[in-house]
Amino acid sequence: MFEKLFTGFLGLMPVIFGVAFMGPVMATLLAEAGIQDIFGMGLMAPCMAFFGAWGAIAIWKGRWI
Amino acid sequence: MDITADLTDKTELELRAMERAIAKKHLDKFPYLSLCWGLGNFLCWLSLWPLVITGVMPLWLGLVIATINVAASYLPSHEAQHSIFAMPGKPLRWLNELVGHLSPIPLVMPFRVLRATHLEHHKYANNPELDPDYGIHADTALGAVWASIQWRQPRPEGDEHRYVKSLKRIGREDLILESVVFELVYLAILISLVWTGFALEAFFLWWLPRHIGITWLHFYLAWFPHNPSCGEGRYSDTRSFKSKVGNIISGGMQYHIVHHLYPRIPLVRTPAAYREMKPILKTMGADVDAI
């Protein structure tokens, strides 16, 4: 049971990495570059959504690129 | 030994004995440079964090130094993987293990995993199935960079990672868990930094330098000495080469053939050992014409 949960959690790591790390980093980089907003949604939410989705694709395909 | 020496009249056994006699001169020398390098490099990388966070050092400079630190963090651990600082049971064994564990922390690679998989690489160098580093094989330099990027994907080559397969094959599944714990702690630290206002520091002092460093390591330590023309066997699984960027920037790998023949010769002594051994290696059929 624990092993299954742990393995499932590990399988989600690309999404967690995308949402919790790459998304906020990209939002910070864009803010540093003077960009304040994406389609009126601010920066953080679109960046987190984008990298979270990319992470989901990475899980499906087995690779980020 | 005269580098033009004609050894064709010697038997293989005689050549091997001559080779061993040369190696013996370079074995069991304490690698002081690697000790200072391993611990100093790690401390330097650690010191970047307060320096950059407090604004004493600009982030761009931190990125440059961190990239050098991460790239340089593997080789001292590599000396420890071969017990060059001290063999098991020797008084300084603790130092061997200390350098081995501390030095590669910026790379987020556990020492025990590196040691287990690297020894498999030595046993099966260039074997498509059994060499854990075979995934870096490529016909061109750009192909090697691409192979290195693929090596870091969730399922490289569409399958389990070669290191995982190698650890399973030798019955060290416990080390797979150790790798996972390392990755989780690394990710937890990165995420904590991001959400406490240090996103750029986390990205430019660790995440990006780690990727650049791993690419450099794969290129000069795994691809260049073993590719594209090397085969399998004692004198053909690696070669010497002349690097356009010099021996230091190529990680001291120009003389990698000496390391595969005598893994316990310290890195800094491989050029001297190579120069002495070269006529023997050439007679034995090794690819040593480049340098």
Image (tube, coloured by chain):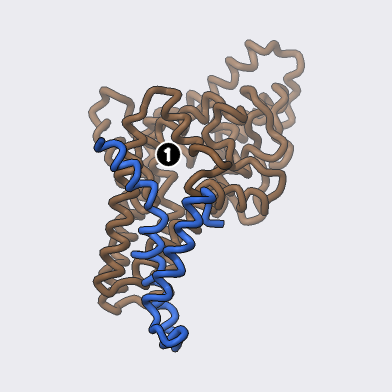
Q: Is residue A2 above or below residue B21?
A: below
On screen, residue B166 above or below B248 = above
Tell me the SS state at disc 1. helix
Where residue B18 sits in the image (x, y, percent)? 59, 18
Whether residue B2 appears in this view of the structure is: no
For image coordinates 30% across by 72% down, the residue present is B198
Q: Is residue B270 left or right of residue B105?
A: right
Q: Residue B58, how many percent across, how many down?
A: 37, 77
> Dividing the picture into quarters, in which one does residue B20 lie?
top right
| Picture quadrant where residue B43 is located | bottom left
Residue shown at 26% from the left, 32% from the top: B92
Q: Which chain is blue?
A: A
Please, which residue is most extreme toward the front here? A1
Q: Which amino acid type is shown beneath numbered disc 1?
A: His
Chain for colour brown: B
Residue at 32%, 61% in the rendered image: B190
Task: Work out whether residue B205 or residue B72 is closer to the camera in this orientation and state it.
Answer: B205
Residue that carries the numbered disc 1 in the rendered image: B78
- In percent of width and height, residue B143 lies at 67, 50
Question: Left or right: where does residue B263 sit relative to residue B281?
Answer: left
Question: Is B95 or A48 nearer to us in this picture?
Answer: A48
Pointer 1 local density, CA inside 10 Å: few below 14, some 14–19, many at least 20: many
Read off the chain for label 1: B
- Where residue B182 appears, as percent x and y from the top left, is 32, 46
Image quarter hosting the N terminus of chain B = top right
Figure check: B111 above or below B103: above
Instruction: Identify the residue at image location x=40%, y=28%.
Output: B28
Residue B185 in sight here: yes
Residue B122 shown left or right of residue B277 in the figure:
left
Which part of the image, by quadrant, shows the C terminus of chain B?
top right
